[in-house]
Image (cartoon, rainbow, N blue to C red):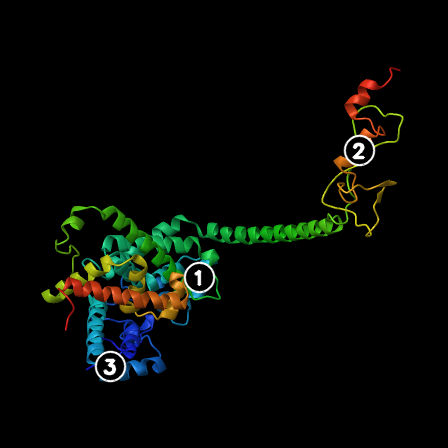
Amino acid sequence: MSSPACERTLAMLPLFVGGDLDAATAEPVRQHLLACLRCRGEASSLQRATGSMRRLAAEPAADVDDGMFAAMNRAIMDQVLVTDVAELTAATSTMSGRRWLESVAAVLLLAFGFWCGQASWQSSVLQRAPMATPANDGPANDGPAIVVPYAGPRVPQRLLGDDVQDGYPLQPGDAAGLMGRERLRSLVDEGMVLPARRRATSQPPR
Amino acid sequence: MFPQPAPRQSPKQTQTPGHELSGIPAGLPSAVAQLAHDVTLSDAELVRRTLAGQHDPFAALVARYQKRAFWIAYHVVGRVEDARDVTQEAFVRLFRSLAKYDFARSFYTWFYRIVMNLAIDSLRKIRSARAGSIEDILGGLPDSRAVAGDVPLERTEENGQVWAVLDKLDAKFRAVLVLRDIHGLSCREIAPVLKVTHATARWRLHRGRQMFKEHWERLQGGPEQ
């Protein structure tokens, strides 16, 4: 059964054995290892494994010597010489030109975005007048022009008790402040407005 | 005795008794060797001169870094031919992207990143090509890596086991272990090379060492006492 101190130490051991803990963090680990045989065994095991890996640095490889490196240097330079240095410096100037173009594009984009923001602020939905659509597409009749306001999201505010719309009292089913379909139907029923189809057929020939 | 933490090593101090992981190879043209040995000439200055149209400064950069690049690639990939290809490709890419070099940043971090990316890509290609091959199915064949020089047999055997364990690790853990434990870079230096945060580099090192130990013990027939 491991104690919390053992668990804390074991969690730090991989970094402790490699010397990757600062002195303040490493000291409690060192003190615990002095007292705990089990954790010390674990640390030794970790250190042996890490040490074996470190010894790989000293392992020579076949055919790797200064001659190979000199040949590699020549091979790299041969490949590099294909790319002319002038080409490289041209790439530098092309890159600076591209950066300049990117900067100009970014400024233009920002200006456009700012302008769009201003325009949309000025013509926001709240400030827009309610749209109106003609009641029909047929020829004008003799009566007053009937306009059905667009029942859009914007509803004109009216005072409490103000239940008159265009001189007509609003009915309970009417859309507040707008001439809704029910109101229009009641006007048709009263004969004050002719529906578009009936009006088109009932007009006297001229 | 409980273990003593290993001393920290900077990448430029890495020297091993068997061979050099860094250093300038012999047999170069004298002008290139002179530039490569000149400690007053920084890497950034060599880059500037290359961009100004000279070739020798770039050959000097190659001379300064080719050993380190090769050994890093070798320890990640595990094969001399592949490591040589990775190193050459890394220098060619370096040359083509010299114009993008940020002079405010460390040159070797930038270059090591190119090497490491190519090495990890190469390792993944090798693994995917090897998946399902007879060596993997049999599993018990001796390691085919050739070793030069007077290396004791038991050491060669141990190194073979280390390679076998490294082969089992995921590329991202292997990369951290190679850079930290074999090449002596600190976690602060490893983080920008692998393009991760310092905390991620430490976590990968922690997890990588743990996994290495587990595989190592399994290979040696259970936990050592």
Q: Say whether residue B188 is visible.
A: yes
Give the mark nearest the N terminus, 2 or 3. Answer: 3
Mark seen at residue B60? none
Observer-nearest of B218 and A19: B218
Asked whether the residues under marks 1 and 3 belong to the same chain, the reply is: no
> Dot 1: what SS?
helix
- Residue A190 shown left or right of residue A114 in the figure: right
Q: Say whether residue B159 is visible.
A: no
> Dot 3: what SS?
helix
Task: Answer few, some or many: residues within 10 Å of disc 1's Cα (few below 14, many 20 plus, some between 14 and 19).
Answer: many
Amino acid type, label 3: Leu
Residue under label 1? B47
Asked whether the residues under marks 2 and 3 belong to the same chain, the reply is: yes
> Dot 2: what SS?
helix
Residue under label 2? A186
- Give the number of the mark in front: 2 or 1: 2
Observer-nearest of A133 and B128: A133
Q: Position of residue A106 (x, y in %)?
A: 61, 52
- Residue A80 shown left or right of residue A126 in the figure: left
Q: What chain does mark 1 sit on? A: B
Q: Position of residue B33 (x, y in %)?
A: 33, 64
- Give the number of the mark in front: 1 or 3: 3
Residue under label 3? A33
Observer-nearest of B225 and B125: B225
Amino acid type, label 2: Ser
| Residue under the point 26% across and 61% down | B75
- C-alpha span from label 2 to label 3: 95 Å
